Amino acid sequence: MNRVYCTARSFRTSVKSNGWVHKWSRFKRWQEMQAAHVENVQEKQRNKNFIRLPTGLYITPERPDDLNPKKAPADMTRKDTGQLPMELLTWHTQMRYVDHSIDNIKRYRRYKKFQHMQYDQRVIPERLLFLGPDLAAAHFLVHRGAAVKFVGDDNWYKKDKWNRYSLPGRKVDNLFIEAIDASGTQIMFEGLENLENLQKLRLLRLANSEYVDDWCIGRIGGLLPNLEMLDLSGCHRISSKGLMGLKASKNLKFLRLEGLSGIRNLGKSALILEDLLPKLQILGMDYELSFRQIEAENRLLEQERVVLDGRGNAFVEDDNSRLFLVMSTSSDDKAVTDDHDNPIMTSTVRREIPKMDDAEFEEINALSGGKLRHLLVGSPSGYEWTETTERILEHEAELNLTDNVITDPKMLPRGKRPEFELPEHRSRLEDAKAQFLKEFGDFEENSDKEQLKSH
Amino acid sequence: MRKIVLLSQIVRPALSSARFVHTSTPLSWQKFENERHFEPGEDVMKRVWHGLSYDFRRWKRRFQEARKDAFKRRHPIAHMKHGTLDNEVFPYRAEIVIIGGGLSGSSTAFWLKERFRDEDFKVVVVENNDVFTKSSTMLSTGGITQQFSIPEFVDMSLFTTEFLRHAGEHLRILDSEQPDINFFPTGYLRLAKTDEEVEMMRSAWKVQIERGAKVQLLSKDELTKRYPYMNVDDVLLASLGVENEGTIDTWQLLSAIREKNITLGVQYVKGEVEGFQFERHRASSEVHAFGDDATADENKLRAQRISGVLVRPQMNDASARPIRAHLIVNAAGPWAGQVAKMAGIGKGTGLLAVPVPIQPRKRDVFVIFAPDVPSDLPFIIDPSTGVFCRQTDSGQTFLVGRTPSKEEDAKRDHSNLDVDYDDFYQKIWPVLVDRVPGFQTAKVKSAWSGYQDINTFDDAPVIGEHPLYTNLHMMCGFGERGVMHSMAAARAYAERIFDGAYINVNLRKFDMRRIVKMDPITEPCRL
């Protein structure tokens, strides 16, 4: 029966354990909390078993420290030496920083939910021993919104609309998982450990999973060597580097990567992976977009003023031999914003303007996607680089006008700075497409004639 | 009439010349409010006036800052900050001063503020990051592995990988997007060629499996089957990491930690550490007045404690000024030994005669392109020659280098950072070709040289307080293991401060007592 028992004890325990003050998110590891809990239980057992009468009564020792295992003085914590914990001493002084806004409560609960998921998706050894690897994985996955399919069974097992599912509650021989559809779930790296020892798993679908990242792909490559079909569409946390974690999956035949156009250099990794795994075919990859991005990068690197360093970062060198970053190997698109999506911190310390021609400056700025001017105004890291940069430029131009300060023409806002005709770059992709159509246009015409003749 | 005419002739040029003089207000770019610090009892009247007028000066400063805010935010404490680094304004006092803003120092600041967030608990990081060639974090290849024989090393690596796995969640700022520490998952492949190496590899593997790492032992047949392009005739046993091994982008991780630190209240100060400030223990007497003259100097050195760090700002002709601190962390990386020498460590007698044996050692990294080597080559380490081969990006571009032995490292010249290309063509390339014949067609694309903080005494870092100056905490000497071990060491330091002892990973064996006792720690699994 689905009856909820709400007693004073459970209410007090839940409120106390959750922490009734939303202070801030704090890093915790469930392994350490579990170990501390086990140690606490053992300590209580030692105290109770000090003198235990046959009737069940017990007498605790006068000095409980005598029963604890001996530690070196340098290893004794504040609890061992009897000092008050630091949290108790400083609890009241930190109340002035408590933020009771709805946004902060949401942030607090978001991080707490993440920490709970780390604990919730751990491997439970008792379940694994009782059910076997395949059935344990099936229970783990179906309970969290996934669907599984077994070998020789055409049914997909998943929860119905009342969150009920029917799976065997004890070990069944010759029951092997063949396919898993965990798309849209919140499975993370810790949860993927439950898929270990699935010998006959062929299909794994993790499309649109929020927490699938490079580490998950590395674990899939190491844990599931017999995998044949993998779907990573819509997993926006993976990168081109992480995709190389699949190079140990020698039996992989299909890899689906739809909806990942924002990831840099993903097409390159896909091509390399297809070279490494001869059976592999990658679906959903937009190679045209990847080629266009690489072409844009090469167009920037072909400029005379652009130099590369040993790590692959590109800088533009002005007439005074000063370097200004225009392309970085690290992805720097992440924004640090406040609640109104404005940058949290902008620097008013300005760098000197690069000494070069205005037209040349404008061209390199356009080729770098606005990054050159973005870094000159202090790298505000807004969501929209260009709009944030223009806003700062406009504000600074007004301020300089008020203070009778001359503004460099390169740092005037859009609409006020001199406009230059940027050279039109013809794309090699379009040239290749035009060449292709020119060569094979007759084939299409002939095929049309064949169709007319057949009719 | 003549007098009147003469007067007009005298006055007229001055009046007419006034119309041609243009004036403009001289505009100072930024008025730094260099707060005055008053010692107890010093200048009572000025101190009173300073206290009474502080609110007005703060209102004026906030108005000026809000005027420069392009986004016109109205929250009273959300005024725009000057920048991540104040070049002139130094704090007079801090609870903890961390010397060095690299990965070790920034991680230490992060874990201190993660554990205890209070505005009055000031954590100051002193760094000098103008010279990028001397930054060991940015020039690191970012390798992460768990294949060690010391259990604490395996624990530290496992903790670091666990933190980096969800670093986006831990280092997120308000509701911004999560920082992305790109991870390139590839296992490290260690090869044993003699029976002693096989036994050492087996015992190390047991340690790793016991601590929870996922490492696989491969025989020669398994190795040949898995990597047919590799020459493994002389190999008896191999060890391959299955997961949690690879390379990360160290610059991305450092910038994410720094941004998180700034929002947590850590103050980054750009300056050069020039010395330390000492003061006498309150319980001890003035030894030069009351003690023996022959041993007064030595007794004074022993009876004092470090109370501050002398930091010189980056401006010209600026003198060093003290930042008083209760606890000081020496996370200066390759220059930790020199920083400790400023405190007299290694120059005195007795306990002060024992130096911090950290030296800046030059390491060359070559970026080579090998079109005939498959892209699924694992990270190779040759234990006898120290040649390593790693990747940081997909493709056939490899980062190769060599870790020389201690004897050879002591003879080399580490003062200049010119890349020694002969080292590649004579000592690195032949080893690679012997192992993987596809490296014959390899070409050098680029190369760089960087410093690493190498412990010349043994193979372990120096973590822990100095035996005499117990508030000076060493966190240096990680060498090639800086990325994978500094995060765990920083968290252990926070545990040490707030809980009184190490709890999760016990790092007591890495403090300076082993150097005093001349008891080195050996780690045969080289990187």
Image (spheres, coloured by chain):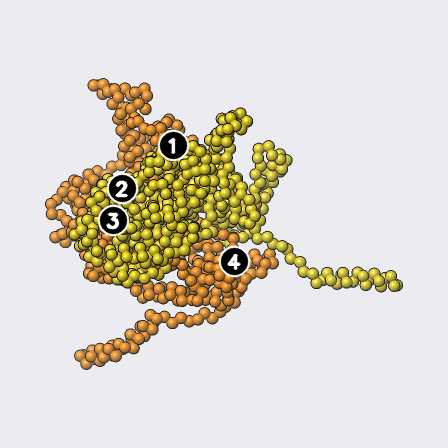
Within 10 Å of the Cα at label 3, are there few (<14), some (14-19), or many (20+) other Cα atoms?
many
Q: Are marks 4 and 1 in contact (CB under 8 Å)?
A: no
Within 10 Å of the Cα at label 4, are there few (<14), some (14-19), or many (20+) other Cα atoms?
few
Q: What kind of residue is marked 1?
A: Gly
Residue B339, quarter of the rendered image: top left
Within 10 Å of the Cα at label 1, are there few (<14), some (14-19), or many (20+) other Cα atoms?
many
Chain A colour in the picture: orange
Disc 4 with disc 1 on a shared chain: no
Chain B colour in the picture: yellow
The chain under label 2 reads B
**Circle on res. B149:** 2
Q: What kind of residue is marked 4?
A: Glu
Disc 2 with disc 3 on a shared chain: yes
- The answer to whether A62 appears left or right of A135 in the picture is right
Q: Position of residue B120 (x, y in %)?
A: 48, 37
Residue behind mark 4: A352
Residue behind mark 1: B500
Q: Are marks 2 and 1 in contact (CB under 8 Å)?
A: no
Residue behind mark 3: B190
Residue B289, quarter of the rendered image: top right
User: How many angstroms separate mark 2 from mark 3 (CA)?
Assistant: 13 Å
- The answer to whether B202 appears left or right of A319 in the picture is left
Which of label 3 and label 1 is nearer to you?
3
User: How many angstroms separate mark 4 from mark 1 (CA)?
Assistant: 49 Å
The chain under label 1 reads B
The chain under label 3 reads B
User: How many angstroms separate mark 2 from mark 1 (CA)?
Assistant: 28 Å
Q: What kind of residue is marked 2?
A: Ser
Q: What kind of residue is marked 3?
A: Arg
**Closer to the camera in the image, A343 or B300:** B300
Identified at 19% across, 81% down, the residue is A453
User: How many angstroms separate mark 3 from mark 4 (CA)?
Assistant: 49 Å
